[in-house]
Image: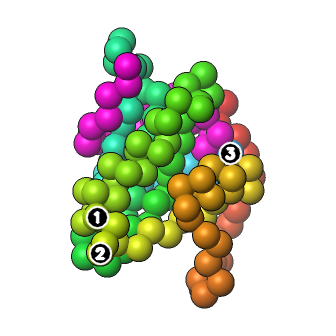
Amino acid sequence: MVHIQCERLSAVEYTGFLKRCDLGSQYPAERFPERIPRLLKNASISLAARDEEGKLVGVLLGLTDFAYWLYVTDLGVDRQYERQGIGGRLMKDALALAGGEKDIAVYLVANEKAVPFYEKLCMKKAENVMQYNHVEWTPFTVQ
């Protein structure tokens, strides 16, 4: 049984989790150790899924105004726990916390491999999203 709750994660625990899920390759190498604590501190919604032993097996981090929109920055599940509905439960809980599906539009940047998962949640590719990005981005994977 996996339990989901609102929880602020430590950078150490989250970095360890990134090694066990596909989110570990979504960040740039530039200043990674400095930036992860800021991400965890400033997320409007921080959900943790834990197994019966307390192991972190799923995470959803998001930014929201609690009125109109939710931007999901991170949604990941430990590879050993995939296909158990944890990601869908995290998304459902985050949407409810942000204000519910009648009020909140959800946006995110999906890894190409994750698109089928999001399509199962009835999400569609957006055509009107704009981007301003001048960030240095050296790809790496958290090891």
- Are circles 2 and 3 on residues that touch, CB within 8 Å? no
In the displayed structure, would residue 104 be above or below residue 51?
Answer: below
Instruction: Determine the residue located farthest toward the top in the rendered image.
Output: 53
Which stretch appears magenta?
1-24
How far apart are the two marked residues, 1 and 3, measured between alpha carbons?
Answer: 30 Å
Is residue 70 at all visible to an observer of this figure? yes
How far apart are the two marked residues, 2 and 3, measured between alpha carbons?
Answer: 32 Å
Quadrant housing residue 18: top right
**Where does the N terminus fall, quadrant-wise?**
top left
Tell me the amino acid under the disc marked 2: Asp
Circle 1 SS class: loop
Is 7 colored magenta in this rendering?
Answer: yes
- Between 40 and 80, the one lying in front of the other is 80
- Are circles 1 and 2 on residues that touch, CB within 8 Å? yes
Residue to which mark 3 is pinned: 25
Here the colouring is rainbow
User: Earlier along the polypeptide chain: callout 2 or callout 3?
Assistant: 3
How far apart are the two marked residues, 1 and 2, measured between alpha carbons?
Answer: 6 Å
Circle 2 SS class: loop
Is 9 colored magenta in this rendering?
Answer: yes
Question: Is 57 displayed left or right of 45 in the figure?
Answer: right
Tell me the amino acid under the disc marked 1: Gly
How many residues crowd mark 1 within 10 Å: few (<14), some (14–19), many (20+)?
A: some
Residue to which mark 1 is pinned: 100
Quadrant housing residue 143: top right
User: Earlier along the polypeptide chain: callout 1 or callout 3?
Assistant: 3
Quadrant housing residue 141: top right
Residue to which mark 2 is pinned: 103
- Between 93 and 32, the one lying in front of the other is 93
